[in-house]
Amino acid sequence: MLHIAIVGSGPAGYYTAEACQKQWGDAETGSEGGVRVDVFDVLPVPYGLIRSGVAPDHQSIKGVSRRYEAVALSQNVRFVGNVAIGRDVSIAELQGLYDAVVLATGAPHDRPLDLPGAELGNVFGSAAFVGWYNGHPQFAALNPDLSGRSAVVIGNGNVALDVARILAKTQAEFAGSDIVGHALNALAGSQLEQVVLLGRRGPHQIAMTPKELGELAHLARACPRVEPGDLPPEGDDMLLEPGQRKSVTHLRSFAAIPEAHRADRDFEVAFDFFAAPRALIAGDDGRVAAVEVERTRLDGARAVGTGEIYRVPADLVVSCIGYQTSPIPGVPFEESAGRFANHEGRILPGLYCVGWARRGPSGTIGTNRPDGFSVVERIAEDCPAGLGKKGRAGFDALAAARGLAVVTFQDWRKIDAAEIGNARDGSPREKFVAVEAMISAAGKA
Ligand code: NAP
């Protein structure tokens, strides 16, 4: 019997569990096979990024959690929620209990916005801001001030697009979403009239996918704006790969929107390309009031400053410049890439990483599936048979000795049912945003 611990119950974690079943278990018949997998999460609720990262108005993407549920309900996979590895239980202890430990901890922290003024009030990283509207307990109390007229979103990736769209939507456009009540109420009182998306490079260098970018053209009150002069000659689009070409085609259509069409819109999502933020400027109240920007030009694919400086009004700033993995004491970490130091998923003997924790925050949710299968191949090469470790029985004894309030998958199903029961009309659920409320809904003390 092989005992495997997976730390993190997001896409990378569950795809790895699925790969373990395929490798050693018997997923077809549901029999237990030769593997036991424990999937740990610091929260009492599973699915990581699917619950806390994917935009609340992208419910079809969240549907992938049904696949993870099927894995979680099989006999040889167990969810072990509300346990913080590195705090409640150390990595060394897990390694003593399991034949292989796989870190699937994602990249939950923002790359730091290394600019003067980054500490000003109403400046947030995307992990915090996205966590706020998605009800992550760590960020539920963020309370961003939406009483100003102008927001600046730094970055030209899909997260920047998510944040801009959420700020631009009307209440009616959140129908069917699972945006949490506190965010919906705050957005109802928002006075924002524009979001400026700062891209330090140009339209050809955006990291936005076409489907997501195209959504901006179909918002109820908001209209996208692209300055035609920022677009490269149309013929150059042929040099792009097809997906990127489609995205740029959207930008071209935004640039062609007639002014008359904008007249009946009261919200603008404006793309400011070749615009590198240099500093955040405080207003009289000590909060952010503007972003100082340097105009750039491309030198090859690199942005270089031109020396032209200007200011963009900003009552709210959300920095969406990418994420990084949290280091764990004793686990080699590659600072520059913001991920665990690894070779093809191997960190140290018996210790592996997968997903964003392995390769950094890139790709789609589906990219994690081959990643999970690949790390399981490495484990199978290194450890073809169990080493006689105690596995879950050993963990249960340790958890009992420490008085850990472990949340099981059956407990999560109670939380799930309570959230579904609490949903406002038309919404799939109203999430609990406090760990205590989740544990209480699970019927635990
Ligand atoms: P990302 O795709 O890496 O984009 C980061 C953006 O920030 C880039 O435009 C980058 O510009 C810019 N940037 C980085 N450092 C900067 C700085 N110091 N100053 C100004 N701009 C800076 O990251 P992300 O948007 O966080 O997305 C992470 C991953 O999740 C991506 O794979 C994304 O596709 C995925 N995702 C997918 C969806 C979806 O499919 N619906 C939704 C959300 C996220 P440069 O290019 O110049 O470096």
Image (tube, rainbow, N blue to C red):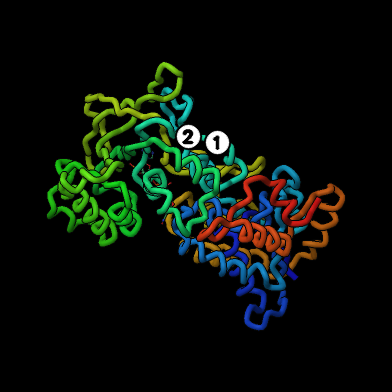
Quickly name the residue at label 1.
142
Q: Position of residue 234 (x, y in %)?
A: 13, 53
User: In the picture, residue 58 is in which quadrant?
Assistant: bottom left
Which residue does the image show at 55% across and 43% down from the upper left? 182
Element on which disc 2 rests: strand
Is residue 99 visible to us here? no
Closer to the camera, 396 or 217?
217
Q: Residues within 10 Å of mark 2 (few under 14, many from 20)?
A: many
Q: Residue furthest top?
A: 284
Q: Name which residue type carries label 1.
A: Leu
Q: Position of residue 396 (x, y in %)?
A: 82, 58
Element on which disc 1 rests: loop
Is residue 251 visible to us here? yes
Which residue does the image show at 66% across and 45% down from the upper left? 434
Taking the image as shown, residue 403 lies to the left or right of residue 12, namely right
Q: Name which residue type carries label 2.
A: Phe
> In front of the other: label 1 or label 2?
1
User: In the picture, residue 230 is in which quadrant?
Assistant: top left
Q: Position of residue 247 (x, y in %)?
A: 27, 55
